Image: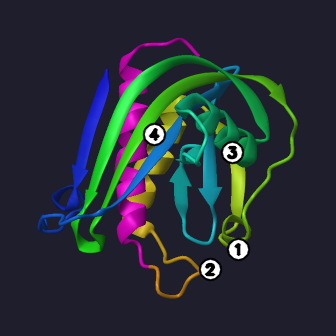
Amino acid sequence: MLHEIIKDENIGLKNKELKNPRKRIGARGVVVKGNKVALFYKRHKNEYKLPGGGVEDGEDLEQAFCREVLEETGCKVNIISKLGITEEFKGASNFYQLSHVFFAEVVEDRKQLDLTEKERVEGGELLWVPLDEAIEKVKNCFDNLKPSPYDEQEDVYSTKFVIKRDLSILNYFKSLHILL
């Protein structure tokens, strides 16, 4: 089972202890259609990420994952398995996120995304790419990230955690040798 811990040192900064941090529970993961993996690309940030997001009140983890996937990919999915968890300790923003990670396959593609205003402004779009290409795109965007045009105060600090987290998920998934 995946259990990845990401701290400031993993993005090139000195670790800072969290004190009564804000907390968030997330649900995200690897979604496959045929032999391709879903990547959500935010063109104006040069960010490639896996589908997923926060768990809302009243949702269980699987419901949250399926809702987030539907919003960001336009696809209904069947969850195959839980891959594990990731933990992010963002010292500079005093924020802790626990993400539950799933593997799912597409059962219906509605071909229509339901993006937030922020995702639209950031140039959000869906890509379907082979697993090795997904790993390369996520890995290679780390040093070329740009701040969000949606929020001038937002820098790339949190996005670097997203990249490290999703790269670890994709590499773990590849290590399982699931044929796509």
**57 or 144, which lies in front?**
57
Q: Secondary structure at mark 2?
A: loop
In three-dimensional space, the C-alpha distance between marks 4 and 3, rounded to whole angstroms, equals: 13 Å
Q: Earlier in the sequence, mark 2 or mark 1?
A: 1
User: Label 2, on which residue?
Assistant: 150
Magenta highlight: main SS: helix
**Secondary structure beneath disc 3?**
strand
User: Which label's residue is closer to the chain start, 1 or 4?
Assistant: 1
**Mark 3 / mark 2, whichever is N-terminal:** 3
Q: CA distance from mark 1 to mark 3?
A: 17 Å
Left/right of residue 60 with respect to residue 88 in the rendered view = right
- Give neighbour class at mark 1: few <14, some 14-19, many 20+ (Cα, 10 Å): some
Do the CB atoms of the residues marked 2 and 1 lie less than 8 Å apart? yes
Badge 3: residue crowd in 10 Å (few <14, some 14–19, many ≥20) = some
Q: Nearer the viewer, residue 141 or 50?
A: 50
Q: Residue at x 24, y 73 (%)?
A: 92
Res. 31 image quadrant = top right
Task: Give the residue type that dot 4 points to.
Answer: Ile
Q: Which residue is mark 1?
A: 121
Badge 4 is on which residue?
Answer: 135
* Location of residue 171 in the rendering, given as x and y in whole percent from the top left corner: 37, 31
| Mark closer to the chain start, 4 or 3 | 3
- Which residues are drawn in magenta? 155-180
Mark 4–mark 2 Cα distance, whole angstroms, equals 26 Å
